[in-house]
Every structure is written in C-alpha cells, then in structure tokens.
Amino acid sequence: MVFPAKKVLRYIFALFFIITLNFFLPRAMPGDPVINLLGEDFIAGKEAVEKIREELGLNRPILVQYASYWEKLLRFDFGYSYHFRARVSSLIISRLKWTFILVAPSLILGTIIGALAGSLAGWKRKSKGNTFSFLFFLFIYCSPPFFISLLFLYFFGFQLGLFPLKGFYTTGNWIDILKHLFLPVLIMTLFSASRNYMVMRGSVLQEKEKLYVWYARAKGHLDDSILFQHVFKNASLPVITLFALDFGFLFAGALFIEIVFSLNGMGTLIYQSILSRDYPVLQGTFLIISFMVIIANYFTDWIYNWIDPRVRANR
Amino acid sequence: MSLLTVERLNVVFTTHQGKVKAVKNVSMTISHQETLALIGETGCGKSVIAQSILRLLPSNAQINGRILFQGRDLLLVDEKTMASIRGKEIAIIFQNPSLALNPVYSIGWQVGEPFRIHQSANRNQSIQESVRLLSYMKFDKPESAVKMYPFEFSGGMNQRALIASALALHPNLIIADEPTQGLDRTLIKQIIEQLDRARKIHSSSMLLITHDLTVARSISDWIMVMYAGEIVEQVPTLDFFQSPMHPYSQGLLQSLPENGFHPIPGQSPSMIENLSGCQFHPRCQWAREQCRWEKPGLLPINGRMVRCFLYD
Amino acid sequence: MKDLIFQRKKYFTRIGGFLFILFLLIAIFSHFIAPFQLRDRFDPFLPPGLKHLLGTNDIGNDLFTEFIYGSRTTLLVGLLTGAFAVSIGVLVGLFAGYHGGVIDELLMGITDVVLMIPRIPLIIVLSAFLRPSVGLMILVMSVLWWTSTARVIRSRTMQIRTMGFVESARCLGFSNWHILFYEILPNIVMIIIPEFLITVASAMISEASLSFLGLGDPTLKSWGMMIHHAFQRGGFLNGMWWWYIPPGMGITLFVLSMVFLSFAFEETEIGMGEEVAIVPFNR
C-alpha cells in the first residue's frame, strides 16, 4: 500500500524531532551535563568526572556529538544506568515484555468490548441497561487510571482477598500468573474499552441518522444485520483514528496500573528512575515510547486506508 | 381484489413544536399492473404515505388506519414479516441515490443485497446477480463496475443501480419516491422509460410520487393530487391533463412552463394548526363563504373523486 | 410539549453545573471551609472521626483540610492549562482553516508532529530534570494539548469560510483580521467551549497522574499528591482508604462535571428521545 508522501514525511519528521529533542535535553537542562547524562546516582571524584566527560565526548563540538548520538542510537545503545547497574537498552527490553503481557491482551479485548458495547449502546433505544452501561463507562473514562487501580485493588484484593496484591507471580505456575494478572488486565481492558465505547457510541448515533441506514431497512434488513453489516464499518472509522491518537495515553495509563500493582514492567522502571533521578533510563524510555506511538500511528493509518475506499482514491 | 388498499390513513408526528398532521384521512387503491401518480408540493405528505406503507416512519410518528396489501393489513403484521415483505414484494426507489448507498461497500455488494437477504444467496452468487442486473441497466463493463464504489459513479448511474436492485426480486408494488429529483432532463426521460419498461415486464404496479407533472403524465394511469395532507382529486391521467377539476389541480397546470408559469398565490398552510373549512380556500379564486366554515368531502363525480364545493 | 432530548441533556448539564460550582466554591473558600491549617500537626494515622473527618496522614496533618485545599491546585492547573491550550489551538485552527494552502499544510504538519509526542512521558522527563512545579506542568501541558482543538476549529473554520456572509465581507473589503475575529470567531464559540471543558478535564487527570508519580509541585497540596503520599507512606498497604479515596473521587467527579457540562453544547440531530452523543477527548 503506497502511502502519500506527505504522511510519510510527517512520520519521519516526528521521529527526527523527538530524537533531536532527546539529544538536547540533557545538554540544555540546568546542571552538569555529565550528571544529566548519567543520572544522580553517579558519584565520583573530580578527576573521574572529567575523564567521563572526555569519554562521553562532551568536549567535542555539538555536531560531532549529535552524529555520534545517532550512531549510538542505530546500534541500540541508550547508555548506561548507574542506578540499576545495567545497560539501558537491556533494562528496557527486559521490562518491556512484561508491559506487553499487560498491554497487548488488554488493548485487544478493550477494543473489541468497547466497540461492541458502544455500538449496541448507540444503536438500541434508550433503556435502563443502556443508561447504566453509559454511566459505568463514563465513570471509568473520567477516573485517572491509577485511581481505578487503587480502588479495585482495595476492594477485590484487600477487602475480599480475591487477588494477590503484588507482582506478576509468586509461585510461577499458570494459575498463579493468571491470578496476578487478572485485576491489572481487567482494569486496563476497562480503561481502553471505555474510550472505545464513547467514540463508537457517538459514531453509531451519528451514522444512525444517515440515509443508507434507512434504505437498508427498506430493502428488508432486520435491525441487527443493519448494525453489523452496514453501520459498523462506517462507525468504526473514528474508532480507528482514535486508536492512533490515544495510544500514547493508553500506554501511559498502563504504566500507572503497573506501578499500583507493583508489576515488573516499564511503569515501575520509570517510577524508580524518577525517584532516583536516573536520567538515562528516563530518556531511553521516552524514546522507546515515542517510537511505539509513531508506529501505532503508522499502523492505524494503514488500517484506515484499507477499510475506507474513499481515502484510497484521494491522492 | 386490488393490490394495495389504503383506508383512512392518518399520520401525526409529535415534535417539540407541536403535533404535525402530515396525512389526513387518506384512502386510495392501486390495482394490479397499474401506475398511480401521487402529486403535490414538497411537504404535503406524499413521502409520508410511502413510508407508512413500508412502515419506515420515525419513532415520533403515530399511524392510524388500514393498509391492505394483498389482503393483509400491513400495520398489524410483526416486524419480521414486514422485513420479509420489504425489498421483495414492495420495493422503494428513493430520491437521493448517492446518499442511499453505503459509501464503504462496493456497488456490486449493495446491488446484490436483496438476494442475500431474501434468497439466502452467498456473497459470490449475489455479486453475479449484480453483474447481470447492471448489464441489464446498460452499465458499461458490469464486471468491473461491481467492484467500484458509489463515490466513483454519478448520481444518475447510482440511481440506475438502485432501480436494478429494487426490481431484482420482481416486487408486486414499486414505490418510486421522487426518483428523478435533481437529475437533468435527458436522464429523467431515460430513467422513467427504464422504470416503466421494467414495471411492465415484471407486471408490477407502481406508486409514483413526484411533483414533476411531466413525469406523472408520461407513465401513470391514475393521478392523485394531495394538498396539505389530504387528497383533493383522484382522476385518470388523461382526464386530469385535459380537464382538471379541483382549483388546486388547475393551479398546478397553470404553473407549468408551457402554460405560462403562473404560480399559485399564497402559501401552503401549516400542518400543525387546524384550519377551519376547506384547506385550500385562502388561495382559491372561487372561494365562497361556505368554503371558510365547512369542510368539503371527497365525492365521486364523473368517474373521479374531488374535494370541492364547486361540484357539490 | 417539552422536547425530550433537551430534558435529558438538561438533567446531565444541571448535575455537571452543580458539581462544578460546588468544587469551585470549595476551592475559593478553602480558608473558611477547612477546619485546620495545612501545616497543623496532630496524632498521625488517625482514622476518620468527629474531629478529623478524614483522619490524619503519616505526619499528622488533617486529611480533610488537605482535601479541601487540594481542590485549588486541581482547579488551577486545569483551568489555566485549558485556557492556554485552547487559545493556542484556536489561533492555529483559525489560521490554518482560513488561509488554507501552504499555511494550512504547514500548521497541520506541525500539529501532526506534536500529536505524536507522548505527553505524559515527556512531562515526566522534563519534570525529572527540572524542579517539579505547577508552572512547568501548566506550560508543558499547554504546549502539547492544543492539537485536538486546532483540528476541530480548523475544520469548522473551513466550513464557515465558504459561507455567504464571509464572502460578502471579503467583497466589501474587510481585512482578514477583521473577518477572522468578527465574523468567524463568534460562530465557533459554541465549539470552543466544549473543547475548553474537555481540555480542562484532561489536564486535571494528567496533573493528578503526574502528582501521583511524585512529580507534582511539592509546595502545593493537590489531590494527586495526597494519593501519592498515601501510596508511598503506607496509607494504601494499611488499608487507609479514607486517605486516597476521597481525593480520587474528587478528581473523578470534577472531571465528570466537566464532561456533563460539555453535553450542553452537543449538536444533536432532531429526533425524539435520542441519546446524547459524546465527542471524546483523544488525548
């Protein structure tokens, strides 16, 4: 699928901008760039600091530094964390897979549930069930994800003792992991579903008024088949667009959920890095998240083009 | 037994501006293989009748009366039965073809829908039928046309595709609601001819709703004139154009370009308030005192029905 | 004969308005409502009681007082961010929509790029480098949150631009500035207000989230900070729900009120008994 040049340009530019921003950040921020690049946990005598400064190339001209920064990036060298005593890239990779275990099923489930519930809510007549689901998802929509996590964890974990309070696993067998994952995945799913619900519902409400819906009924379609065969495809277009825009927000939400549940993913990595002012990790994670957002955008654009024939024609 | 008999149909819409009486006590009959043209100005309630027959009115509408189709009262059947009638025994052709089509599905998929809905055809079979229908409608290269989308075709082509789709299952009654709205003269002629031809081949009846008198003249057997929700004259087509009886009908003919383009003075009445007497009297040049206070009934005169005191 | 849609919308809007005014009053009159001072100390870890409605925290501060004063920061950050972000968005949207062509392409390109920057992570990085403060938060959020508004305003402006009265104003020789601000702007006010409300809502959630991470302004007690302390200092693990649930509910209700208020500006199609549609905030 060929992409219009303008769009590709924007992606490249965004990538460039973020990487450059990341480059200038530690050098432009107040404080010694050495500390900014290594984190506050780095303690050493004056001579050692000067040696490091030389090694990091901070005395060389900016453009040279920029070039070597790019070179390092392409080798996936994000620096070293003194707090964790590990290379930033390996830290990120090891944590990222846990975050994926949380995020991937939740996003898929959340999108499906939200889209289905939202389309039914928009399509069917006003009813108690309708209003209830609307208010339920609205509540989740308006709550910060970390608060919902605390709330759920308090009720289901603390009070009812149904679920463990911390971590990804205690014993390591399947049932145990599922028990640990249940609440976080549930909350993440609800969180993503609530957003999809709102868009889908609004979208279906608008599509409902259109002539082709009326006409489908005039051809002899029954209610449900009109919704799923005709309306759904049209109504899901804004949902797809939303996914791209929302991905960053959704991912950030996942991080908060991880923190509350003490899951060993990116979220807790970032949290600990904030506490210890571990700048290399913070920067590295920022970059990785940005990449993911850009990829999500690209992916979403691709799907949108695939579904809506009008876009394919407009070049 | 006639194909369609409408008895004392009343439709009222509840809106936040009040109750709109769109259709007032309308009765009519369409026999087999007959075309009835329902004419009147925009907003006089013609489309509402069409939608009532198919039970496609919005939720704020209240219907009273009987609509007998092949002996069954359509207002009493359940939704499932109604759905099986729509598109198969009664089909509708609408006025805005490009909007009536779903923008994200291909023409072939949509034209083939009646087969999937009513005949359990699968996707491939229905697309094949679409190709057949489109070639019948004189589409160039129908095999590639079925893969294209509504936005790639002109309004006229979309309309032809829709007509083909509506007639696909040989409906007994075709309702054409302003099928030529917004199309240019030559296209109108083509479409009307095709419509008429198809109707004759399938031996269907047609309810043609239009405000274009020329179109009505060319293919209808009967003409029903509606004004402000009421029938004011019901007459064989030839007689209508030779000697219209109701003052409104006369006014309509006068307003044709070939007769001098004389508009009817005044405005159509509000459908919310109740007007005393004859609804047309404020605009009628022969209005008498009686017309202001008494309402004329629809009475048979010389083989037609007229609602006017002039002929009482 | 009352219109059912408006009745239903009124119901939501009234609740939203009520809640909003309630919180506003709490924020403005914190001095009078709070029973104690923020820095007053009592016995720590007290459960809710008559004297301390929400108990006390780990250093003995009265939690109810913290809750009352916390509303201020939330409101402040939300409203200011909303005001700045929407202003930027309106300007960008107006210019892009009105002038079209190269300017439009350029502005929309910038918008797209800004949209792809993950916001919370960026603020996290910046706040970690610099001293966390309210000003920083408001500034960075304003600079990142205007994109959605800009898009909406742009498409509306493009619609209005083609309308008759704009053309005639042009023909009469009015300058572009005049047209933008006197002809077009009044027509988009109805869209700006819900955008503002939704931006405020998003900003409040973000402020709370960042404060929860400990990146909030340490000098200002915000609801997010309260929850942060609860989480960090044993309030959560000890089951002291009165510490973190009231501020959390406060945030949720405040955001809810904004969303309810935005319903009032919905453009719904006319149909009896139709539901309220919601324009989502994609932030």
Image (cartoon, grey):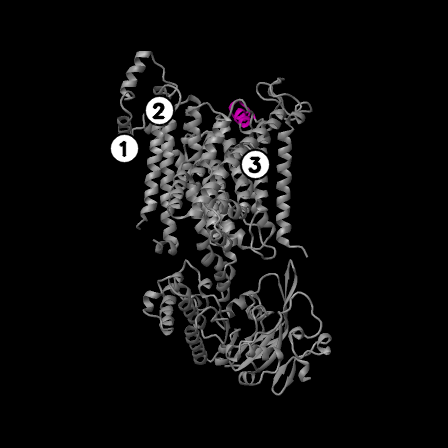
| B162 in the magenta segment | no
Chain of the residue that carries numbered disc 1 in the rendered image: A
Q: Which residue is mark 2?
A: A27
Callout 3 secondary element: helix
The magenta-colored residue range is C225-238
Disc 3 sits on a residue from what chain? C
The crowd level at tag 3 (other Cα within 10 Å; few <14, some 14-19, many 20+) is many
The verdict on a common chain for dots 3 and 2 is no
Which residue is under mark 1?
Answer: A74
Distance between mark 2 and mark 1 Cα atoms = 20 Å
Marks 1 and 3, how far apart at CA: 43 Å
**Where does label 3 land, which residue?**
C252
Residue C163 sits above or below residue B32 on the image: above
Of residues C33 and A10, the one nearer the viewer is A10
Q: Residue A70 lies in what quarter of the image? A: top left
Residue B4 visible: no
Q: Which mark is residue A239?
A: none
Image coords of residue A208 (percent x, y): 51, 57
- Would you say residue A208 is visible in this rendering? yes
